[in-house]
Amino acid sequence: MEKKIITSANAPAPIGPYSHANLIGNTLYVSGQVAKDAQTGEMVVGDIKSETRKVMQNLEAILKEAGMDFTNVVKTTIFCVNLGDFASINEVYGSFFTDNFPARETVQVSKLPLNVNVEISVIAVK
């Protein structure tokens, strides 16, 4: 199968040698997103809910570029530096899904790129 690189101008540019997403057949693998604003290049800082909302908006932009949305998401991975923030992260994350929720794992890590508090990646199927 052919691999198609998906890039969205509405998501922050990758900070390393990776793509926003790869589309293989009808499956989209989206790289982990952080709370960076695509237009300003600034990090969204403040509370964990604001940070998580921006992460989800960045994921949404990449999904849209591939002709998908959150209803296509079958798997997510959430990385956070403080599992104590899980309830707030989960509240915002959950607001982007209506039903048929994807499979998911949440992992606490000691540090994330750009010193963010949350990073989320998804797999979606058309």
Image (cartoon, rainbow, N blue to C red):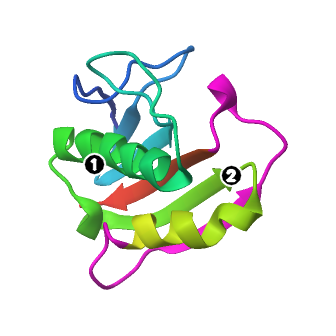
The front one of 118 and 67 is: 118
Q: Disc 2 marks which amino acid?
A: Cys
Residue located at (27% from left, 80% from top): 98
Q: What's the magenta region?
A: 95-117
Q: Looking at the image, is mark 1 or mark 2 earlier in the sequence?
A: 1
Looking at the figure, which quarter contains the N terminus? top left
Task: Answer with left or right where residue 85 lies relative to residue 93.
Answer: right
Residue 70: quadrant of the picture = bottom left
Q: Where's residue 30, x and y in %?
A: 43, 43
The front one of 115 and 12 is: 115
Vertical comparison of 48 with 1: above or below: below
Residue located at (38% from left, 16% from top): 41
Q: Where's residue 105, x and y in %?
A: 65, 68
Vertical comparison of 76 with 8: above or below: below
The front one of 98 and 19 is: 98
Number of other residues with Cα within 10 Å of mark 1, as a class: few under 14, some 14 to 19, many 20 or more: some
**Marking on residue 80:** 2
Q: Disc 1 marks which amino acid?
A: Glu
**Marking on residue 60:** 1
Residue 110: quadrant of the picture = top right
- Indicate the secondary structure of the residue bearing disc 2: strand
Seen as rendered, the residue at the extreme right is 110
Q: How many marks?
A: 2
Magenta includes 107?
Answer: yes
